[in-house]
Image (cartoon, rainbow, N blue to C red):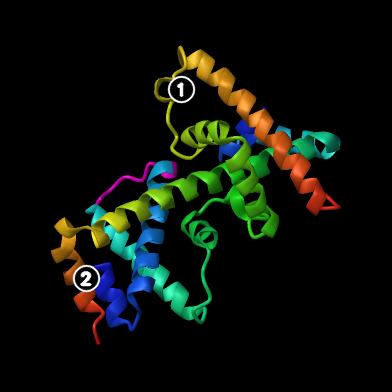
Amino acid sequence: MIEHYLLSDGKDGERFLFEAKMILQPELKQQVYWQNKTYQVVRDYGRKQLKNEINNIHETLFNTAEHQSFRQKVMRLFRK
Amino acid sequence: MVARHVSKMGGSFEEAKDIFQDALVVYYEKVQVSGLKLKYQEKAYLFGIAKYLWIKRYQENDKHVTLDSLVLIFNKEIDLADTGYEEVSSWKLMHLLEQAGQKCMQLLSAFYYEKLDMETLAGRFGFSGARSATAQKFKCLEKVKETVKAKSLKYEDIIE
């Protein structure tokens, strides 16, 4: 299966066989290409969500009164 | 710690913020993907990554280093993600998918990015069980794949 090929990193015989199949079947190769691209998009999406979450935490840390002393401590490092 | 380092190296607050946040992402992905066994404290890893990111950024004359090139370096094996990420269209594409298929994207990213198992996935998304979560995940993957394909073909004339 394509997913198994793309997401496992084993260098087993199965993998080799799959690669041989791709040479013989161009449409399989295309399917693999699109599936891989889809994984990339999903990963980018996940990454973006994570970055959003991190940024929310950043906003909380740097823009709320209760974390002011932390903020000041950090900002002091950048005062030249 | 990261902020102090960046500041010592002449960086700004914004740069420190970027570096720190990127380091968190790289760290998260590393632990997630390889199940990296921690021999030291988390913050030691984070600081190590951040230091590396800073050097990297500095070397490339402030040219912004993408997370991808970094993850690539951190991975010893071949990263499947190394093709075509820089294409402008992939961001357009994502924007589109965020609009049209939010639910599917959340489901797929929970499985492929957060690496949750099907049971947990079913719980989070309100499916009756692992089996129906699996079915839904498969449907979503097909659906998103079709969108990716349809939209990409407008930008690319030749598929390798």
In the picture, residue B55 is in which quadrant? Answer: bottom left
Q: Position of residue A13 (x, y in %)?
A: 65, 33
Give how far apart the Cα atoms at labels 1 and 2 are.
41 Å
Foreground: disc 1 or disc 2? 2
Mark 2 crowdedness (10 Å alpha carbons): few <14, some 14-19, many ≥20:
some
Q: Are marks 1 and 2 in contact (CB under 8 Å)?
A: no
Q: Give SS at disc 1.
A: helix
The answer to whether any part of residue B160 appears in the image is no
Q: Position of residue B77 (x, y in %)?
A: 54, 51
Residue at 32%, 82% (x, y): give it.
B9
Q: Looking at this rendering, what residue extends furthest in the bottom direction?
A: A80
Residue type, label 2? Val
Residue at 58%, 18% (x, y): give it.
B135
Residue at 49%, 61% (x, y): give it.
B70
- What is the number of callouts on the image? 2
Judge from the rendering whether residue B130 lies leftward or rightward of residue B42; answer left or right: right
**Along the viewing direction, whichever of B98 and B40 lies nearer the viewer:** B98
The answer to whether any part of residue B75 appears in the image is yes
Q: Chain of mark 1?
A: B
Residue at 55%, 48% (x, y): give it.
A44
Q: Give SS at disc 2.
A: helix
Q: Looking at this rendering, what residue extends furthest in the front direction?
A: A65
Mark 1 crowdedness (10 Å alpha carbons): few <14, some 14-19, many ≥20:
some
Residue type, label 1? Met
In the picture, residue A71 is in which quadrant? Answer: bottom left
B38 versus B130 height, above or below: below
Mark 2 — residue?
Answer: A74
Judge from the rendering whether residue A27 lies leftward or rightward of residue B145; answer left or right: right
Mark 1 — residue?
Answer: B118
Which stretch appears magenta? B33-39
Q: Chain of mark 2?
A: A
